[in-house]
Image (cartoon, rainbow, N blue to C red):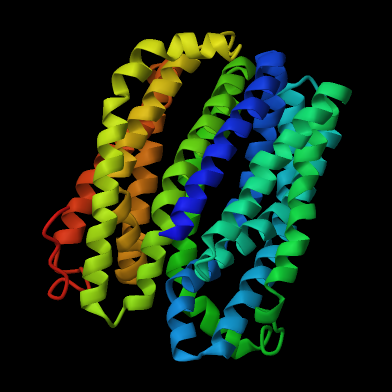
Amino acid sequence: MKQSVGLVILQVIGIVLGLVSVFWVAGSLPAEKYAVVGIYNIISTLILVFSNTGFETHAIRNILSWKEEGKTDSIKLIVTQAITFRTLIASFIFLPVIGYAIYISSNKFEGQYLGLFVLMGFLSISKATNDATVLLLKAFNKYLAAAFVTYSVNVFGKLLALLLFIEFGFNAYINTIMWLPLIITLPVIYMLRKNICFKGVFTKINIKKGISESKFFAVSSYLSYIFNFMDQLLVSIFLSAEILGSFSVAKNILAMARTFIENIFDPLIQNLVRFKQNFDEMKLRLNRIFKIKNILLIISIIFIPFVFFFTDEILLLLNLDHYIVLNYYVFFIYIAQVFLIASKVKYNYICLFFSQKSYLLITAVNSISTLFFFIITIIISPQLLFIHLLLTNILMFFYTEWKFKSTQNPYNYEIRITRR
């Protein structure tokens, strides 16, 4: 609970700084220029998507339990495998990303920014490594440290980039956010050094064992990343740079909203891994988490009319009124987050405690529905792009309710939730 309080405080600071940095830059640039930032998000996400191995998810589900059992060697092996293989695979993925950089430069920016786009891909290798280290910190239930690392890249670093933007212009801004993941990752690896050991990492038996234990998590991660990333890719290919600029601003707003919700619930639910064998304690703690969820859900519902009636005024105040259809995106994103709060606890619980196949299934349902709804909305109108997120979260709310009550729940007979 202390971590969640600390994370909320950090989140409030992060939201303020994030709003200042992102919206100042976005408000100072034409949508076509800010689209370059959207291309960086796409390229870095491509590297993140295809470098995922599933080792980090396996670590999240087991490291706390292994610590209780004294399995130090298993912890060192999974930590080292996660960092090493993520970095190596990301380096290979960089090569085909160059092709995307050439295409997007030629077709959307009249041949400009090619060198910048290629550099984005190269530096995104370190962003993949950074992502692995953040997930490993979460596996040790060090969510505050993980959040600080994430905020150093996405919030505090962007504040620095903003100061450089004011003084030196857009090139200084974009280069700062590109280099930050590399600079931040090095001390994080040092933080994890006691759990890094290359003994046996590259042996055939350990590689096969690691792949076998993580294969469903890897497939789940690919599905989650790919289908949720396709929206950015499709927008960059089929819609104008102006729409891409608005879409990129909206994605920043969405990322802040999701992070706020995750920072409240993820550490609380992750800590339940300690109590795999203590059903009474798990029941008690899970009920507490449901109460927190209900309070936050009520508060978020109360603010719906405010968001509906005052979005245009807020965007005008932030100097973002020149981003077309952004007001629609903001409203759809907010309502979608209400449903995310409603399903978040049970979704995380399923991901942590159900079988690997159940983990894969819930990820597939979430990812495929996201892409399906997005394709429909992009065909109908650019104004409706983020309604796909709302439809997906509504579907996941009903799916998690059904799944949680099913006999597939590994603790179905031990945990009797009286209040949900």
Residue 368 % position (x, y): 37, 45
Question: Residue 366, can we see it?
Answer: yes
Q: Position of residue 32 (x, y in %)?
A: 69, 17
Q: Is residue 71 left or right of residue 114?
A: left
Q: Is residue 169 visible?
A: no
**Image vertical order of residue 193 relative to residue 378, above or below:** below
Q: Residue at x 71, y 63 (%)?
A: 188
Quarter of the image with the N terminus is bottom left
Q: Camera-side residue: 241 or 134?
A: 134
Place residue 354 in its image quadrant: bottom left
Figure check: 236 above or below 58: above
Instruction: Tell me residue 120's x, y (percent).
Output: 77, 42
Q: Nearer the viewer, residue 188 or 55?
A: 188
Q: Nearer the viewer, residue 341 or 50?
A: 341
Q: Determine whether 28 is above or below 195 in the image.
A: above
- In this picture, residue 127 sits left or right of residue 300: right
| Residue visible at 58% across and 39% down in the picture | 14
Q: Residue at x 66, y 77 (%)?
A: 80
Q: Look at 29% across and 83% down and name the residue there.
A: 277
- Where residue 145 appears, x then y in whole percent? 60, 59
Query: Is residue 138 found left or right of 79 in the rendered image?
Result: left
